[in-house]
Amino acid sequence: MSKLHITTSINNEPREYLCEPNQSMLDVLRHELGLTGTKEGCGTGDCGACSILVDGRLVCACLMLGAEAQDADIETIEGVAGDAGLHPLQTKFLEHAALQCGICTPGFIMASKALLEKHPNPDEATIRYWLAGNLCRCTGYDKIVRAVQDAAAEMSHPA
Amino acid sequence: MEAYAYAAPSSIAEVTALLQEHANDGRPTQILAGGTDVLVQMRSSRRAPRTIVDIKRLQETNRLEVSQDQIYIGSAVPSARMQENSELKALYPGLLEAADLIGSTQVQGRATICGNLCNASPAGDSIPALIAAGAVCDIATQSGAREMAVERFVVGVGRNALADGEFLLGVKLPRPGVGTKDAYLRFTPRTEMDIAVAGVGVSVTVQDGICSAARVAIGAVATTALLVPDAAKALIGSTLDDDALQAAGNACQAAAQPISDKRGSAAYRKKIVAVLCRRAVQVAGARAIER
């Protein structure tokens, strides 16, 4: 079976790759492009560890084929920190100890980033429902919610 | 290792020709829109398609239109895009609530209600809501389009009415007039990320305090979601008073043919479907008289 040639944009850089027709976007990111920040948890769309943004929408990279990325605009955890340093969400996750083992963290950061782009000042219920598709077995979620609230506050009123 | 191919045609004719050609040769195909069911099923080998036909490149499947007489939701429109349409949300709050109950934010970024329909799970939340709304399937065939009421589209567990060479282009819904509103309620043990034990979709029209039209559909209590005409009959002509609600709930209970499984016993499902019906009618009725 011949491979497909895909041209796309990942973290604002044009990229091209070859992939199998049934290869997931997650597999392409990790194994074809070396972008291993996006994690595989369940592989069935239940845990959110592989969350990425596709054309500005939050999706599970395991529930998308690499072939579907043709002409798309993809954002992964590798694109979140800028030249000036960490994104406020990343800083707040560190300050609030909103991670322990860290496997779920890239997915939580991507999901939180998508949340704050749509709802800059979310209440706690909005945060918890939005993040319901991201599973964490370490933190008990409370520290994550606090970190997102704090990041939202800082992003709307920069010190 | 199964051999796969991937095609992303840009016209309806290309898609139907590809589907028909493969059907004639006995080669399986799989339509791909959001992929949130299909890719999971492929991974678990419940589906091992040889050719994946991605329909997201078609202009027609990406239509999301609210016009003066009807609403069109294309089969590639993700749930998140529906939720962002405030006019659609105001006209069909129940359908939008049903779609919002399906999956996480991530899943809703890809998943489509047409996919929910084609996947044909007995517990698919958007199906009773679509039936209550009076939605019609717009099906592409090699000789043009054909239409089919949503309640006839799902024919069994995981089976739909699409023939070889056909695919679902979208669903058409009537634009509800003043005094017509819908609601969808389901019961799950958890508040999020769960599958319905039972669900009820309702649309009612209230004119001068009297219910003049109604549609009631039940989900997760039979092999397919069911339209319950007797529940609608119990409501029409009433003021949506307690007796009418009770009779509509009883009609849903009588129509339900549930199984017992890990999510609930058949007896419990029969009981809860009546409760959900009464509550959903109350929600839709209150919405219908809001001005």
Image (spheres, grey):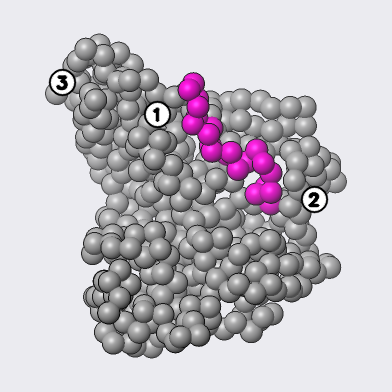
Q: Which amino acid type is marked by label 2?
A: Arg
Asked if the stretch drawn in magenta spans residue A26, the answer is no
Kindly report the distance in space between the C-alpha atoms of the residues bearing marks 2 and 3. Answer: 56 Å
Residue B132 circle label: 1
**In the drawing, does residue A49 fall left or right of residue A99?**
right
In contact (CB < 8 Å): disc 3 and disc 1: no
> Element type at marker 1?
helix
Q: Residue at image x 36%, y 56%?
A: B194
Q: How many C-alpha atoms fall within 10 Å of the one at disc 2: few (<14), some, or many (≥20)? A: few
Which stretch appears magenta? Answer: B54-74
Q: Which amino acid type is marked by label 1?
A: Ala
Kindly report the distance in space between the C-alpha atoms of the residues bearing marks 3 and 1. Answer: 20 Å
Q: Would you name the residue on which mark 3 appears?
A: B241
Please identify the quarter of the rendering in which residue B105 is found: bottom left
Residue at mark 1: chain: B
**In the drawing, does residue A57 fall left or right of residue B132?**
right
In this view, the residue in front, B98 or B232, is B98
Does the image show residue A155? yes
